[in-house]
Image: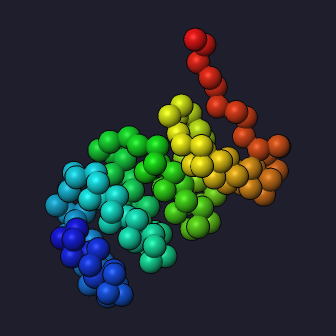
């Protein structure tokens, strides 16, 4: 059903995609890579509400900074900016984050912080003593 959902989205058959998505969620699919592929395709079609649902399902199976960042992006675009900031703040704690991803996340956090008057952005992530 996951592949049917992805293919339907690529063919701009959103109703068919949502029907397939229902089965993906009902079957409790636990393949994180496939769930993320579905969620990313939903997000690329501006179906962020559904993407959030699938990203959360993926994160309930396995933690991933990249998935958490993508969840934050969809939440941000849905207007759930404080929830997005929480996701981004968690991502900033990942020491292995790629520089480009780190910069993007920091910009989003700064944008949210300015919008909500939270000071000068997020505090830098704590760095463990070595």
Q: Position of residue 10 (x, y in %)?
A: 34, 81
**From what the image shows, is residue 123 above or below residue 101?**
above
Q: Where is residue 85 in the image (x, y as percent from the top left)?
A: 62, 49
Q: Position of residue 57 (x, y in %)?
A: 33, 53
Q: Does residue 84 show up?
A: yes
Does residue 58 appear to the left or right of 31 in the view shown? Answer: right
Residue at horizontal 40 percent and vertical 65 percent from the top:
40
Q: Does residue 83 show up?
A: no
Q: Look at the image and name its color scheme.
A: rainbow
Residue 61's image quarter? Answer: top left
Residue at horizontal 73 percent and vertical 34 percent from the top:
123
Q: In which quarter of the image is the N terminus?
A: bottom left
Q: Which residue lies furthest to the top in this view?
A: 130
Residue at horizontal 44 percent and vertical 61 percent from the top:
52
Residue at horizontal 54 percent and vertical 31 percent from the top:
95
Of the pair 102 and 42, the residue shown nearer to us: 102
Of the pair 29 and 101, the residue shown nearer to us: 101
Does residue 78 appear to the left or right of 3 in the view shown? Answer: right
Q: Which residue lies furthest to the front in this view?
A: 99
Does residue 113 appear to the left or right of 10 in the view shown? Answer: right
**From what the image shows, is residue 28 above or below residue 90?**
below
Of the pair 111 and 18, the residue shown nearer to us: 111
Residue 108's image quarter? Answer: bottom right
**From what the image shows, is residue 13 above or below residue 73?**
below
Q: In which quarter of the image is the C terminus?
A: top right
Q: How many discs mark residues in the rendered view?
A: 0
């Amino acid at each position: 059903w996951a592949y049917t959902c992805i293919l339907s989205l690529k063919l701009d058959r959103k109703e068919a995609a949502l029907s397939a998505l229902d089965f993906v969620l009902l079957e409790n699919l636990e393949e994180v890579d496939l769930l993320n592929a579905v969620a990313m395709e939903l997000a690329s079609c501006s179906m962020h509400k559904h993407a959030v649902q699938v990203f959360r399902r993926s994160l309930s199976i396995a933690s991933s900074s990249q998935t958490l960042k993508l969840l934050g992006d969809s939440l941000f675009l849905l207007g759930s900016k404080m929830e997005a900031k929480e996701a981004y703040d968690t991502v900033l704690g990942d020491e292995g984050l790629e520089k480009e991803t780190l910069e993007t996340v920091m910009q989003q956090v700064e944008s949210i912080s300015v919008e909500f008057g939270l000071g000068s952005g997020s505090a830098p992530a704590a760095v463990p003593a070595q």
